[in-house]
Image (cartoon, helix red, strand yellow):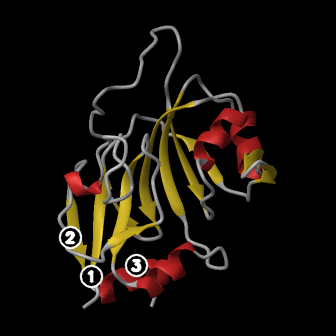
Amino acid sequence: MFRYFITYKPYQVLSQFSSQDDKQTLKNYFDVGKNVYPVGRLDYDSEGLLLLTNDTNFNHRLLHPTFFHEREYWVQVDGMPTQQALQQMEKGVDITVDGKKYHTKKCTASLFETEPNVFERIPPIRFRKEIPAPWMKIILTEGKNRQVRKMTASIGFPTLRLIRYRIEKIELNDLKPGEMTELSKKIIYKKLFHE
């Protein structure tokens, strides 16, 4: 039987169940039985929405580059991006992927007018009184390794905190870090693949 889980991967947790270098893994938080694995990954220092399943077809449809899926990230950055910097990011910027120059696809990037309602991170970001640390919403249709961090750095505003909030119509909603909920195949396929 196929199973589908929505999880909030906490900060400083590896996107895998096998242990490595004494770092925390998904196993420290989620008990989902055998042969259930993350779909894609979130970096150790990123947090937020991570899907787990034992459905390999689902995995392929979500990750293969021929399929486009919106991914929404909430990103706290170091310094206040200008409209010009945001527009530059939206048009696409040059980053390095696997040692080669890569121009990112068009995306949407905007500043939150008021700080989003997010859970406190432990440990918190470093705070400097004289430098603002606003939140941005970035929506991509691709997912290269560390892409969001590379994109904000390329416009001069390094990422301090990164939360993946949404993939297509699946959102974190009220999930707290380390929490999980299970969805039926019918619901998850409808939300992700519009079936």
Identity of the residue furthest to the front in this view? 21
Of mark 3 and mark 2, the one earlier in the sequence is: 2
Image x and y of residue 4, in percent: 29, 77
**Which label lies toward us, 3 or 2?**
2
**Kind of residue sitting beneath label 1:** Arg
Image x and y of residue 56, in percent: 43, 84
Whether pointer 2 and pointer 1 mark residues with C-beta atoms closer than 8 Å, the reply is: yes
Task: Please give the residue where the numbered disc 2 appears in the rendered image.
Answer: 32
Which label sits on residue 191?
A: 3
Q: Is residue 168 above or below residue 117?
A: below
Disc 1, SS: loop
Task: Please give the residue where the numbered disc 1 appears in the rendered image.
Answer: 3
Q: In this view, does 117 lie above or below 194?
A: above
Of mark 2 and mark 1, the one earlier in the sequence is: 1
**Kind of residue sitting beneath label 2:** Val
Residue drawn 22% across the image and 62% down it: 180
Q: Is residue 52 left or right of residue 83?
A: left
- Residue 186 lies in quadrant: bottom left
Q: Is residue 86 left or right of residue 1?
A: right
